[in-house]
Image: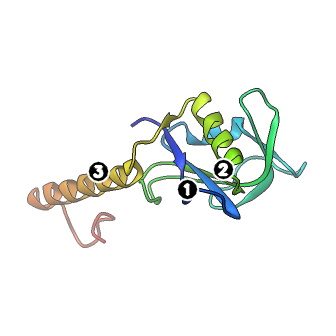
Amino acid sequence: MPTIAAIATAPGAGGIGIVRISGPQSREILSRMFSPASAKFSGFRPWVLHRGRALDHEGAPLDDVLAVFMPGPRTFTGEDVAEIHCHGGPFIVQAILETALRLGARAAERGEFSIFRAHETVLEIVCRLLLKKKNIYTTSSPLNR
């Protein structure tokens, strides 16, 4: 699957803007465009917001932000996901998105994050049905939720 990125908040100006990156390169892209505020930062702890600055593709600061990395498969898309929470002005949000795109993400199509999730769900269902048919689907199986 490709790594995709998009603005995850409603269009227009707002208090907060969120840029979401999903796919196998999401953590690497986030690491390249984030400078932590704390000298004690030693890497992204999953599901924890980290304060710092978003950087453009040349390393120039764009905004003070919060960033989070969420490893798959327990994300909406089923893939690794990174988010940058920034000030909600359209210029800043767009600049952060463009940085993610320059660093290797592809612009997500409308609804593509949801399509990723639907694809993962269909695969889970098919796998469960196949396992059940082969009689290896037991109550102790981790797939039996």
Going by the numbered disc 1, the residue's amino acid type is Pro
Residue 16 lies in quadrant: bottom right
Which of disc 1 and disc 3 is earlier in sequence? 1
Query: Picture quarter containing residue 114?
Result: bottom left
Left or right of 91: which side holds 23? left
State yes or no: discs 2 and 1 in contact (Cβ < 8 Å). yes
The label on residue 90 is: 2
Sequence-first tag of 2 and 1: 1
Q: Which residue is drawn at 41% across and 51% down?
A: 113
What amino acid is at disc 3? His
The CA span between labels 2 and 3 is: 31 Å
In the displayed structure, would residue 61 be above or below residue 88? above
For mark 1, does the 10 Å Cα neighbourhood hold few (<14), some (14 to 19), or many (20 or more) residues?
few
Q: Nearer the viewer, residue 59 or 92?
A: 92
- Residue 80, percent across and down? 51, 48
- Residue assigned mark 1: 11
Residue 28 visible in the snapshot: no
Instruction: Answer yes or no: is residue 76 visible.
Output: yes
Residue sitting at the far left: 133
Q: How far apart are marks 3 and 1 (CA)?
A: 26 Å
Q: Do the residues labelled 3 and 1 touch (CB within 8 Å)?
A: no
The residue lying toward the viewer, choosing from 120 and 128, is 120
Task: Identify residue for label 3.
Answer: 119
Q: Position of residue 77 (x, y in %)?
A: 42, 54
Give the percent coordinates (x, y) of residue 23: 48, 42
